[in-house]
């Protein structure tokens, strides 16, 4: 459903150029849960941003079904994100002036076939927290609101950038379980990037990046439930 | 010391980064500084020029006009206690003729002692010298310039009915006529009115004043009790037809100049306060934002051991840099504008030298005032930030604490979209900042309304005065008091459609300590050509005063006023003020003709006539009037209107156009700064929305929706403030020359709104570019 061929990304940084990605080939299958592992600076975030339509590759080709994303303009990328992609970030990025329900509604208002915000929040176990503002929620709760916001539009791809990076282990486990459940129940293609190798155990496929290249990928034969993970 | 150098580098780079915002603030600062310097230095220049002229050319301190007194009387005056110098002279009015100029010219004639230079009211010659023979004359410089007269040209004066050829031997100005206007005028008309200084013998012979004088000027010893001296002088000159001792305040030139200086003083305070107040507010929001983003930096600096004082000084550095820029820019602008302003003044006021220089003390005051404004705007934000202990400041800022409140419950209703909720909750979240922004924009909106109010009010003022109150086309002055017979001969002249007579008599009005010299105008209550503002009809009995005059004298309707008629005989009597008239231009007193004749114990007597004419026949009429011996002069009312209009354009309207532009730039600075700060604070939020699939337009709507609401709230408040400014203005700018009437129209509100919206739109358009460049990834990554 999503296919990247020989993707490179070069950032000019003053007088030097940074090669964030060097010819990455990647295919995401419908409904699979992929974990991208790598140290910081390995290019995993850049790859995620390009897949998510936040950035365009310097060279290479990227197709979502038959849409050529590497040639898309800003307007087309906005459309792609609006219709097909859900994002979860390390720092939640909730809108402080909106309640949990309203943060989710921010997305359902513009999506074509969304679930009700209440349903999305119920899926992440927050039906009791609908009318709380972000400042009134714990970190784990905020991240679950962010997940509810990401899935409420029933996205085809759910992209998560270090979703547990700002959380402690047990809260992180809960958040990952939510992601796993959703992947399972809604059959949403999910990509999680992390530098935490343990999280790879919950994936269908594990991809390792280093220095802007995929250095290893393999299917996980012994997939574990997120709740069993500890770090 | 090196660590301070490092802080200085930090300051330099950050100032450069925030340059657009800081320039916007510096602009508002520079406007305040500019107005302050411009008005103050113009006022100083004029005051200095006035003082020098008065001092160097011995401008007299007391004046007495009388019918005739023997010259020996001046010896007695000199012996009065407190008198230092006495100068007697002969004064008269005359008609003047110049070849090729058909309009009537009036001249004030003054004698110059025959054997010596005058002791008082000396002349400053641009060329030539004092008259040495009875055939020589010195003419006032503006009159010479208006007619391009040169030394040794000749002019004809009609002295006591005799045409006398005079040779110009001097062109000069006098401290007595810095503002040179005719006795009944409110505006200078250099073509139709001039001052002539003649050899004493010439005037004495022509007016039969040999060994006599009819005007005397005095210089006093320091510390003299003027009022006591005035009483002595009045007693001394009683039997010589003295019209009462008058000080400088009763001299039209001095009075006009003083009022102008007073007004400059008012403006020099009011406008800078407004603009520097606005800049203080802009500083405040800028610093709050700057410090919020640098919480961690501040904590680190403190952790490294920088003192609170050093950090405070560092952040105050922004203010100092901006103020420095603002003051330098304002000073440059003001040098240039003050020169233009002084040049404008020199068109109306004739000084020996009028140079503009910005004093170091003025500059220092401007700098100090601006620094105070900047400090007031910033100290609190900095102080609050540096007080926070380092450990606390190093933790990431907690999310902005929105919580449940009645207003949030209200906003939770399904009626609102998420975007509307974001906008409204942010507004409610920062009530002080929102409030101040609304207030700041409202001030600019108010200034815009105020600016257009001036244009409107002046048009209305001229319309009322020249279309409603004075409907005559031509005003004719007779050489002598005549009866109704003269009206018949005027009516017979070519082009005259209608004639009405009037009488004008010089008066001194007294009420308690206040004295005012003017002329009463008497006309028929049935007049078709003259109306008193606010009155349906001229009352049959009693006197009517212009409101401004009634206020000055403290003599409202119903009071008895001490009126001294200075006619053939001097008659002093109490007359009841029956009404006041809200005239906007000039000041005066009015009586019915019957009442005046009764007061003066006379039958019908007229000093002039009002005519309605056929404008096609104007030239023929002028020629005919010039040939009538009983006509002393005449004025075309439309021409007087044009002159007044030109004066208004030059002064009030120029000043207002400047305010108009300034107010617009202030609105721009306010809106732009707010948008910049809103974008900086909301960058992450807006980036999130973009990531979620919102388009540029959709997030722009959220960002600018807040500004739009602030601007919308500011509009009506601005209207209210503008109306207050206008009301204040109509009180403050209330001089003998004119009072700006308080009239409002719908257009004013429209202009104010249009101005604010235009400035806001420009600011928003500049911001749209920034919004488009929003770096989604960077905004989301950062904490």
Image (cartoon, helix red, strand yellow):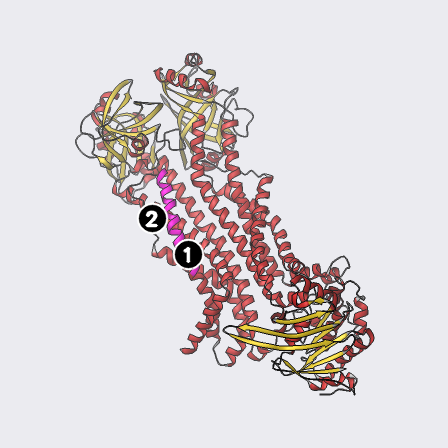
Rendering coords of residue B498 (x, y %): 48, 16
User: Does the magenta run of residues contain B333?
Assistant: yes
Q: Quadrant of residue B197?
A: top left
Q: Is residue B712 above or below residue B396?
A: above
Range of residues picked out in magenta: B325-348
Q: Is residue B407 above or below residue A49?
A: above
Mark 1: secondary structure: helix
Residue holding disc 2: B356
Q: Quadrant of residue A140?
A: bottom right
Residue at position x 78%, y 79% from top? A180
Residue holding disc 1: B329
Camera-nearest residue between B435 and B584: B435
Residue B491, which numbered label? none
Q: Is residue B461 above or below residue B662?
A: above
Question: Is residue A137 at all visible to an observer of this figure?
Answer: no
Q: How many marks?
A: 2
Mark 2 surroundings: few (<14), some (14-19) or many (≥20) residues within 10 A: many
User: Does the magenta run of residues contain B202?
Assistant: no
Rendering coords of residue A214 (x, y %): 66, 81
Q: What is the quadrant of the N terminus of chain A in the image?
A: bottom right
């Amino acid at each position: 459903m999503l296919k990247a061929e020989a993707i490179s990304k070069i950032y000019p940084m003053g007088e030097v150029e940074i090669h964030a990605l060097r010819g990455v080939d990647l295919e995401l299958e419908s409904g699979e849960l992929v974990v991208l592992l790598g140290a910081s600076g390995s290019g995993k975030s850049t790859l995620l941003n390009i897949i998510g339509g936040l950035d365009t590759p310097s060279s290479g080709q990227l197709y979502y079904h038959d849409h050529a994303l590497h040639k898309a303009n800003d307007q087309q990328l906005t459309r792609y994100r609006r219709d097909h992609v859900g994002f979860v970030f390390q720092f939640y990025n909730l809108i402080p002036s909106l309640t949990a329900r309203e943060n989710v509604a921010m997305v359902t208002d513009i999506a074509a076939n969304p679930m009700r915000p209440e349903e999305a929040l119920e899926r992440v176990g927050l039906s009791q927290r609908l009318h709380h503002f972000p400042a009134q929620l714990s970190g784990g709760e905020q991240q679950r609101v962010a997940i509810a916001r990401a899935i409420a539009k029933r996205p085809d791809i759910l992209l998560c950038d270090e979703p547990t990076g700002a959380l402690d282990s047990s809260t992180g486990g809960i958040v990952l379980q939510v992601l796993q459940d959703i992947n399972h129940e809604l059959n949403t293609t999910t990509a999680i990037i992390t530098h935490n190798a343990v999280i790879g155990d919950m994936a269908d496929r594990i991809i390792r990046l280093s220095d802007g290249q995929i250095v290893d990928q393999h299917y996980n034969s012994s997939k574990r439930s997120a709740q069993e993970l500890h770090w | 010391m090196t660590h301070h150098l490092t802080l200085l580098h930090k300051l330099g780079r950050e100032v450069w980064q925030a340059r657009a915002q800081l320039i916007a603030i510096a602009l508002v600062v520079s406007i305040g500084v500019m107005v302050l310097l411009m008005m103050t230095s113009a006022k100083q220049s004029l005051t200095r020029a006035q003082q020098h002229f008065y001092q160097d050319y011995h401008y007299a301190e007391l004046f007495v006009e009388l019918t005739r007194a023997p010259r020996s009387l001046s010896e007695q005056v000199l012996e009065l206690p407190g008198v230092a110098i006495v100068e007697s002279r002969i004064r008269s009015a005359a008609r003047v003729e110049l070849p090729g100029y058909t309009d009537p010219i009036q001249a004030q004639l003054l004698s110059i002692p025959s054997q010596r230079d005058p002791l008082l009211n000396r002349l400053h010659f641009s060329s030539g010298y004092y008259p040495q023979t009875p055939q020589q004359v010195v003419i006032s410089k503006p009159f010479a310039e208006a007619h391009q007269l040169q030394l040794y040209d000749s002019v004809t004066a009609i002295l006591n009915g005799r045409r006398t050829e005079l040779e110009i031997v001097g062109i000069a100005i006098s401290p007595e006529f810095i503002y040179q206007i005719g006795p009944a005028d409110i505006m200078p008309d250099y073509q139709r009115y001039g001052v002539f200084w003649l050899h004493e013998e010439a005037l004495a012979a022509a007016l039969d004043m040999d060994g006599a004088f009819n005007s005397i000027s005095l210089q006093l010893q320091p510390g003299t009790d003027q009022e006591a001296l005035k009483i002595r002088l009045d007693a001394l000159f009683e039997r010589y037809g003295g019209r009462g001792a008058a000080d400088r305040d009763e001299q039209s030139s001095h009075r006009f100049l003083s009022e102008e200086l007073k007004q400059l003083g008012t403006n020099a305070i009011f406008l800078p306060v407004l603009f520097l107040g606005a800049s203080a507010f802009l500083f405040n929001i800028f610093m709050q934002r700057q410090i919020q983003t640098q919480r961690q930096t501040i904590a680190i600096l403190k952790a490294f051991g920088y003192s609170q004082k050093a950090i405070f000084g560092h952040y105050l550095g922004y203010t100092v840099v901006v103020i420095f820029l603002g003051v330098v820019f304002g000073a440059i602008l003001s040098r240039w504008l003050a020169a233009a302003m002084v040049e404008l003044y020199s068109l109306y006021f004739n000084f020996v030298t009028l140079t503009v220089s910005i004093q170091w003390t003025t500059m220092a005051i401007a700098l100090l005032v601006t620094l105070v404004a900047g400090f007031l705007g910033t100290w609190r934000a900095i102080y609050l930030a540096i007080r926070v202990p380092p450990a606390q400041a190093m933790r990431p800022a907690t999310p902005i604490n929105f919580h449940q409140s009645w207003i949030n419950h209200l906003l939770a209703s399904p009626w609102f979209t998420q975007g509307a909720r974001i906008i409204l909750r942010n507004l409610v979240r920062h009530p002080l900042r929102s409030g101040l922004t609304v207030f700041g924009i409202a001030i600019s909106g108010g200034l815009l309304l105020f600016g257009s109010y001036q244009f409107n009010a002046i048009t209305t003022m001229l319309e009322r005065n020249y279309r409603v109150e004075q409907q005559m086309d031509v005003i004719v002055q007779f050489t002598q008091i005549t009866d109704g017979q003269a009206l018949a001969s005027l009516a017979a002249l070519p082009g005259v459609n209608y004639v009405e007579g009037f009488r004008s008599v010089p008066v001194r009005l007294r009420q308690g300590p206040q004295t005012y010299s003017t002329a009463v105008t008497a006309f028929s209550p049935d007049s078709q050509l003259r109306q008193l503002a606010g009155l349906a009809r001229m009352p049959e009995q009693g006197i009517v005063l212009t409101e401004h005059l009634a206020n000055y004298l403290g003599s409202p309707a119903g009071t008895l006023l001490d009126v001294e008629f200075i006619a053939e005989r001097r008659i002093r009597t109490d007359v009841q003020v029956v009404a006041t008239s809200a005239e906007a231009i000039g000041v005066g007193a009015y009586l019915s003709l019957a009442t005046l004749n009764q007061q003066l114990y006379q039958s019908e007597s007229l000093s002039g006539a009002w005519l309605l004419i056929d404008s096609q026949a104007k030239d023929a009429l002028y020629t005919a009037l010039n040939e009538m011996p009983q006509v002393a002069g005449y004025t075309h009312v439309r021409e007087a209107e044009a002159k007044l209009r030109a004066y208004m354009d030059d002064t009030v309207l120029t000043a207002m156009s400047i305010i108009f532009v300034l107010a617009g730039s202030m609105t721009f600075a306010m809106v732009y700064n707010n948008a910049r700060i809103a974008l900086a604070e909301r960058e992450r939020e807006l980036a999130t929305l973009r990531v979620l699939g919102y388009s540029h337009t959709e997030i722009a709507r959220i960002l600018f929706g807040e500004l739009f609401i602030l601007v919308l709230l500011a509009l009506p408040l601005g209207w209210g403030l503008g109306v207050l400014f206008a009301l204040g203005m109509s009180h403050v700018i209330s001089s003998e020359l004119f009072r700006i009437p308080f009239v409002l129209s719908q257009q004013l509100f429209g202009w104010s709104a249009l101005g604010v919206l235009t400035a806001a739109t420009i600011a928003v358009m500049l911001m749209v570019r920034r919004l488009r460049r929003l770096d989604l990834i960077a905004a989301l990554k950062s904490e």
